[in-house]
Every structure is written in C-alpha cells, then in structure tokens.
Amino acid sequence: MDSEIAYLLGLSLLTSGQAQAAAVHFATVQKLGGPLQSKALERLKQIRQISSEGGREDLQRFLQELSARAQIYQEQLKTSVSVAPTINNTGASMEYAGSESCRSCHPEQHHSWQETGMKRMFRAYEPANVIGDFRAKEPFYAGDRFVWTGTRLESTQGESRFAYARMIKDKGKHFFEIKSANGSWTRYPVDYTIGSKWQQAYATRLPNGQIHVFPLQYNLLHKRWLNFWQIIDPEGSARADVRTFEKFGLNTSYQANCAVCHTSHCGIQKAGASRPIISNPASQASTAKCVMDHPVAMPAPFVPDD
C-alpha cells in the first residue's frame, strides 16, 4: 500500500469517528516511511491521548501493538492481490473491459458495487451530485491554516491571507472563480465531482482534454471549504499552494494523481498530444473497477511537456 493512500484512509476514518481503525492506517504509514511519517506519528499520539491518559511507556506499548497490527494488515493486502487468474491474451484487447462486462458472471457483486461509494467516486458533473455550498457570499481566503485535532477542524487566519476563490451557482450550474496572479478573476465550470459522502472535490476539463482538480474541497461534516492538501501534506508541498492551480501542471492533474486508482479505461497520454489526454473517463468507466481480480492493462502515467 502507498503511504499517502494509507494516510488518507486513516484521516477519513479519524474524521468519521473511527479512531482505532484510523490508527492501524497511520501505523502502516509509520512502517512504510516517507514524508508523511512524522504526521502519522502525530495522529497516533492524538488518538492515544483521546483514548487514554497513559504515560510514555503506555505510548510505546500502544505504538508497538499498532505496528504489529499494521504488519498483519499489510500481509493481508499482499495475500489478496498475490493470486490472479491466468488470462489468455491471444487476440484479446489490452484495455479495461469496464464494469458492465462484470455483470454476466458476477451479478450480485455488480449490483452491490453499484450501491457503494466507489461507484460514485468520480462522476461527470450533474447538479444533483454536488454537496458543496456554492451559495457563500464570502470568498475563500488563501493563507489561512487548517489543522485537524482529533475529530475537530480548527483554523487560524494567516497574516498574508488573500481572497482566492469564489464558488458560485449561475443559471443552475456550478463554477469556481479563481483569482490569478495578475489579480483578475477567471471562471471555470465544474465538469466532474470527486467523492460523495463526507467530503467532495471538483475538477474542470480544459479544451485540450486535461482534467485539473480545484485546490479546494468541501467538507460536509464541518460544512466549510478547506485546502485539504495543506492539512495532510508535509510542509512545502507544491500542491498545497493554491496558486499552482493556474499553471495546470502535474500537481493539479487528475490524470497524473488520481486516475490510476479512481478511473479505469481512461487512455492517458502525453500532454500536448494530438488527441485529448483523456477521452471521457466518466462515460467509459466512471471510477475504480473490479480490476484487482482481472488485471489486464494499466494506463500509462501522465507525462508533461518538456
């Protein structure tokens, strides 16, 4: 498991009140190492403080027990993906088949999956699917700091804060208005929604086919907009800087950061190629599919122009 994925899973479980389950994922990050290791340790200390008033020895024992549970969890993950059926590729397409091809052999699983959050993870824009508040009169101010303490979201105003984004609804459609470096406001349509439960992100599609994720997400539990990457990323993270959005580079690219897990059959290409980077991910295969048991072909990574 990727350490960032483990950290995000832990964070989502923690904010939904499942502290013990979250602790296993944070412990997994500890074992995997990387830039999120220190943040994971802080989360574990928070969880320990919430659950008990124990001293240092109790904390060490707590971490050791979680490390053992994280090891078991990782072994279970490896076991679940180590055995895959043999595939006869003679004359077969090397593209994802899509979820509909699963229905004939796995009708019950297909029906069950249709009701899951993963089915609704990445969807083409429909006004009814939007959970964010696009009626706010005040703009979102960049430069403010957000911190999760247990299940509480705390924010402090930054000294150099500035009005950065306005989320609006115009004639029944949703838009982001982003203040660019030159001081002008540019309006972008919401073309995709990402997530459907406790938090939702949004993305826009450029004329060249690139899909870029807006730097702000709406948290339904706390009913507010926030810079989610600033909360979970290490200090100095490029994507946590909202001003990178207008550059339309790797840091905000859906294809580069999200598509491999959340969208199958997406035809990722080199940026600037003659045809779009992604033809229509939401209509071909709207989200992650049952490809763990039927691995066929992984999409190529997003490659920026030189």
Image (spheres, rainbow, N blue to C red):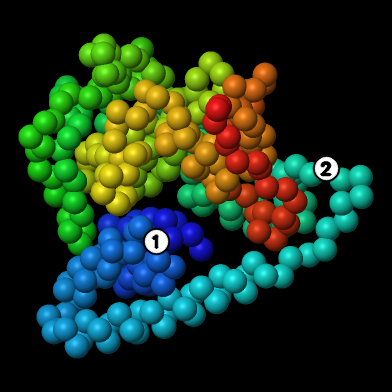
Compared with 302, 42 (above or below) is below
**Pointer 1: what residue?**
34
Q: Residue at x 41, y 19 (%)?
A: 189
Which amino acid type is shown beneath numbered disc 2? Ser
Q: Is 267 positioned to the left or the right of 35 in the image?
A: right
**Is residue 262 something that shows in the picture?**
yes
Q: Nearer the viewer, residue 100 or 179?
A: 179
**Pointer 2: what residue?**
93
- Name which quarter of the figure residue 107 lies in: bottom right
- Name which quarter of the figure residue 214 lies in: top left
Residue 216, given in percent of the width and then of the height, sits at 31, 35
Q: Is 260 positioned to the left or the right of 108 in the image?
A: left
What is the quadrant of the C terminus in the image? top right
Residue 125, given in percent of the width and then of the height, sits at 47, 28
Compared with 88, 172 (above or below) is above
Q: Nearer the viewer, residue 265 or 230?
A: 230
Distance between the alpha carbons at the discs numbered 1 and 2: 37 Å
Q: Residues within 10 Å of mark 1 (few under 14, many from 20)?
A: few
